[in-house]
Each structure stands twice: as C-alpha cells, then as structure tokens.
Amino acid sequence: MLTGKIRNQVDEIWEAFWTGGIANPISVIEQFTYLLFIRSLDEIHTRRERQAQLGDGKIENPVFNRRQGKFRWSKLKNFDPDEMFNLVKDEIFPFIKNMQGEDTT
C-alpha cells in the first residue's frame, strides 16, 4: 500500500517527466527504470568497494573503472540537468549497452 509520502514522491517524479516533455506513461516508466538500473550499478560497485577494504584493497570485478566514476549514481545525481542528459545519452547508455555478456553484475 502506498503511503502518503511515497505517493507524493511518485507524483513529483511524474510531474518532472511531464514538464520535461515526456507525457507517455510507458516512456516515463522506461526512463525511470534506466535511472534505477544506474543506481543499482552504483550500489553493487559500492558493496564491492567495501568488500575490498576488508581484504587486499583490490576491487574484484568492478562495475566502473576510474574513468567511468562519473557514471555512478552518487556522482550523476549532482550534475545539472543538461550535463546529466548528455552524459547519460552519450556515455552511460552506450556503457550499459556494452555490458551485455560481461560479468560485471
């Protein structure tokens, strides 16, 4: 059951997509799913970093390399909207597309 807080958050997300020019509910769900996937990749990488700190310090099967650090949700969420859009379009989507078949997740 949706609480009032969660319902308000969902409404804010829908409003943000709507005012951004995405009115089709399927497109909103698709875009939101990509953002959740990017966030989950960051969480996986963070978990592996913590495991590495307990061991030899080397991250086993890192999701992101040093150059791709800006792809992490923890960094991406702080970008201005235009910069975020361009990064996702030009670099993160191709990164996700090329993940297929890799043992990164």
Image: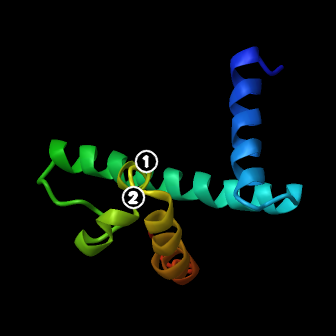
* Relative side of 38 to 12, left or right: left
Number of numbered labels in the structure image: 2
Categorize mark 1 by other alpha carbons within 10 Å: few (<14), some (14-19), many (20+): some
Q: Residue furthest left?
A: 56
* Relative side of 67 to 99, left or right: left
Q: Which label number is shown at residue 43?
A: 1
Q: Residue at point 70% right, 61% down?
A: 31
Residue 103 pos. (x, y %): 46, 72
Give the residue type that dot 1 points to: Glu
Give the residue type that dot 2 points to: Arg
Q: How is the image coloured?
A: rainbow
Asked which secondary structure carries label 2, the reply is loop
* Relative side of 67 to 22, left or right: left
> Decide: marks 1, 2 in contact (CB < 8 A)?
no
Q: Does residue 99 appear anywhere in the picture?
A: yes
- Work out whether residue 57 or residue 10 is closer to the camera in this orientation and state it: 10
Q: Residue at point 39% right, 58% down?
A: 72
Q: Residue at point 38% right, 50% down?
A: 78
* Relative side of 42 to 23, left or right: left
Q: Is residue 50 above or below residue 31?
A: above
* Residue hosting label 2: 72
Q: Is residue 55 above or below residue 105?
A: above
Nearer mark to the viewer, of 1 and 2: 2
Asked which secondary structure carries label 1, the reply is helix
Q: Residue at point 43% right, 57% down?
A: 80
Residue 45 pos. (x, y %): 36, 55
Q: Does residue 62 appear anywhere in the picture?
A: no
Q: Residue furthest top?
A: 4
Distance of mark 1 from mark 2, alpha carbons?
9 Å
